[in-house]
Image: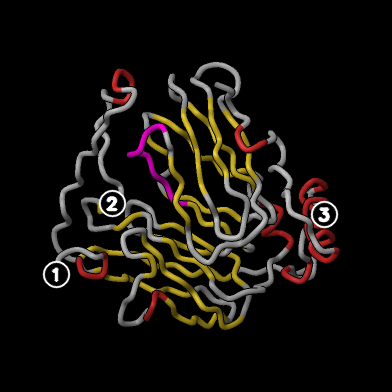
Amino acid sequence: MQFGKPNRVQRKAPPRRSRRWSRRQWLRATGALAGIASGTLIAPWHYAAASERYGSTVRGRFFYEGTPPERRKLTVDKDVDCCGKFDIRDESLMVFPQGGVANVYVYVRTRGVPVAVATAEKAPRQVLLDNRDCIFKPHCLALWHLRQELHIVNSDPIAQNVAFSPLGDLPANIVLAPAPGENTEATWRFRRSQTQPFVVLCNYHPWEKAYLLVRDNPYFAISGEDGGFEIADLPPGDWEFQLWHERVNYLNLPEWPQGRRTISVTGEDVELGTIRLRPSDLGIGG
């Protein structure tokens, strides 16, 4: 078995496409990759003037109404000597003691939202996905593909696999060797923004699952254990926001039809308050 090199994965860049590109596609791709390599800003039509500073934050909290269902214990039937010692349970609905709902995605759906240079410069260059304790950690993550890459790590003493197929982008099937040792990590760069998160799987361990949102701006958040979220540094304007949860995809709520809502940002913070989620909103019950 050859670790860390499936689908011609390179440590610093994804594999080249095999199909022939048009001149316009070639210029667009090479210009984007050059921007990543040099650390400069890519797609300048998305960016504000260097002197711009945006300071508005949109925040809120997701609250579960009622008693949540018990998290189902998952079947662990591979690498049992290692994985069988962990209490691995379904993570598709994470409700915490105070009613907070974690792992709800909130992101700006509008295209071409300007980003201040200061915001771009403080974004971490890598987003970590860790194979640890025979699950993916974190279960939900997001990245800004124009400035960030995915850093994949295997912390378990068994071989792991990371596979995903984003719409219109290169698929990945990455094998990581057991830890500690060599070939226990890899990086991946995405070339295209996605309209919703896609699933990340481990073909060796079918219970392992995560979700990843890839966007062309940094205006996204994932709710934490208290259900809270905030999206900072928003520019003034009327922006359409999207809610997404893995159990139902787009959350359809009275004030968020198809999970969407246009919010006016005028330079002040926007407090959305508590967004209440009924069991039926998350596909639970009749």
C-alpha gap between disc 3 and disc 2: 41 Å
Q: Main secondary structure of the magenta part?
A: loop
Dot in front, 2 or 1: 1
Residue type at mark 2 is Met
Q: Is residue 85 left or right of residue 258?
A: left
What residue would you read off at disc 3? Answer: 30
Camera-side residue of 234 and 260: 260
Residue 3, numbered label: none
Q: Residue at x 72, y 49 (%)?
A: 17
The magenta span reads 204-211
Q: Residue at x 30, y 58 (%)?
A: 101
Asked which secondary structure carries label 1, the reply is loop
Asked which secondary structure carries label 2, the reply is strand
Asked which secondary structure carries label 3, the reply is helix
Q: Are marks 2 and 1 in contact (CB under 8 Å)?
A: no
Query: What percent of the width, then of the height, locates residue 270?
Result: 47, 75
In the rendered image, the vertical position of residue 283 relative to residue 263, given as above or below: above
Dot in front, 3 or 2: 3
Quadrant of the frame with the C terminus: bottom left
Query: What percent of the width, then of the height, locates residue 199?
Result: 44, 51
In the rendered image, the vertical position of residue 81 relative to residue 217, given as above or below: above
Residue type at mark 3 is Thr
Query: What percent of the width, then of the height, locates residue 31?
Result: 83, 57
What residue would you read off at disc 2? Answer: 94
Camera-side residue of 25 and 242: 25
Quadrant of the frame with the N terminus: top right
Task: Report crowding for label 3: few under 14, some 14 to 19, many 20 or more residues within 10 A (C-alpha).
Answer: few
In the rendered image, the vertical position of residue 230 relative to residue 134, given as above or below: below
Q: Are marks 3 and 2 in contact (CB under 8 Å)?
A: no
Residue type at mark 1 is Gly
In the rendered image, the vertical position of residue 17 relative to residue 111, given as above or below: above
What residue would you read off at disc 1? Answer: 286
